[in-house]
Amino acid sequence: MKYLDLIAVLFAAVLLVSNVASTKLVVLGPFTFDGGTLLFPLAYIFGDVLTEVYGYKRSRRVIWLGFFALLLATLTFQGVAALPAPKDEESQRFAQAFGLLLGLTPRIVLGSLLAYFLGEFANAYVLAKLKVKTEGRFFWLRALTSTLVGQGLDTGIFLLVAFYGVFPPGVLWTVFLSNYVFKVGVEALMLPVTYGVVGFLKRAEELDVYDRDTDFNPFRLA
């Protein structure tokens, strides 16, 4: 496994950076979304690469590693935000800014973790199952289908858990569509690159796993 550790580290890095960047809302053309959306689709692309080349079982381990990395970062930010700062004016100002940016509310934390967990595992499951059914053909179709399912769950669950009852349903629906269309669009545009990376890894690793007898239980790590 020459490149599995590299893919795993990049996956976790994208997940952590996008989670921090999500504290700012941005406007890009007709889309309004959190800043993490600019980078987060790469996590699903890495997920596709992992499952396509290394199989669901190895992808499952990396998803769990990403989950614990995200949990550790979130708990650390929460703990630091809760600790008192020195009484001088400058320290208090920085502490307030830190709390506003990274001291996330429990609903946002729970929504982020649940959305990541369910979305990533759904993405890996659909891709692995379709690979067996299509006998490894039509990667573009499998990648897009798994993304449609995974990103739909990820975006929908996060918005419902984090913001249901905070914003009107119409606003939530608009934000959902904006995020969903953008994320799936990025995956579609990146397909040529994903094809190239998958092809390179299969040749370099001399590996192309088919999950014909895999136990897809997300909690089975053995």
Image (cartoon, rainbow, N blue to C red):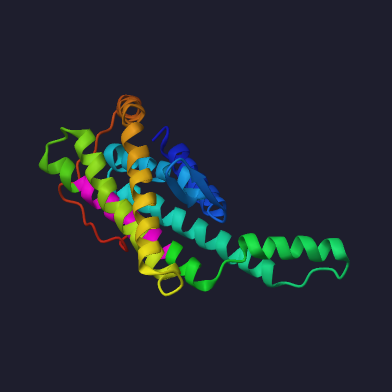
Pick out the residue farthest to the right. Answer: 88
The image shows residue 184, relative to residue 159, as above or below, that is: above
Q: 31 or 74: which is nearer to us?
A: 31
Q: 44 or 90: which is nearer to us?
A: 90
Q: Quadrant of residue 167?
A: bottom left
Q: Position of residue 51 (x, y in %)?
A: 29, 43
Q: In which quadrant of the rendered image does the N terminus lie?
A: top left
Q: Quadrant of residue 168?
A: bottom left
User: At x 32% / y 43%, what residue is drawn?
Assistant: 184
* Residue 47 visible in the current orientation: no
Horizontal side of residue 119 vs 97, given as left or right: left
* Residue 64 visible in the current orientation: yes
Q: 71 or 27: which is nearer to us?
A: 27
User: At x 38% / y 41%, what residue is drawn?
Assistant: 46
Q: Position of residue 82 (x, y in %)?
A: 68, 72
Q: Position of residue 94 (x, y in %)?
A: 77, 60
Tell me the magenta residue range. Answer: 113-128
The image shows residue 148, relative to residue 110, as above or below, that is: above
User: At x 14% / y 42%, what residue is drawn?
Assistant: 132
Q: In which quadrant of the rendered image does the C terminus lie?
A: bottom left
Q: Position of residue 49 (x, y in %)?
A: 33, 38
Q: 133 or 164: which is nearer to us?
A: 164
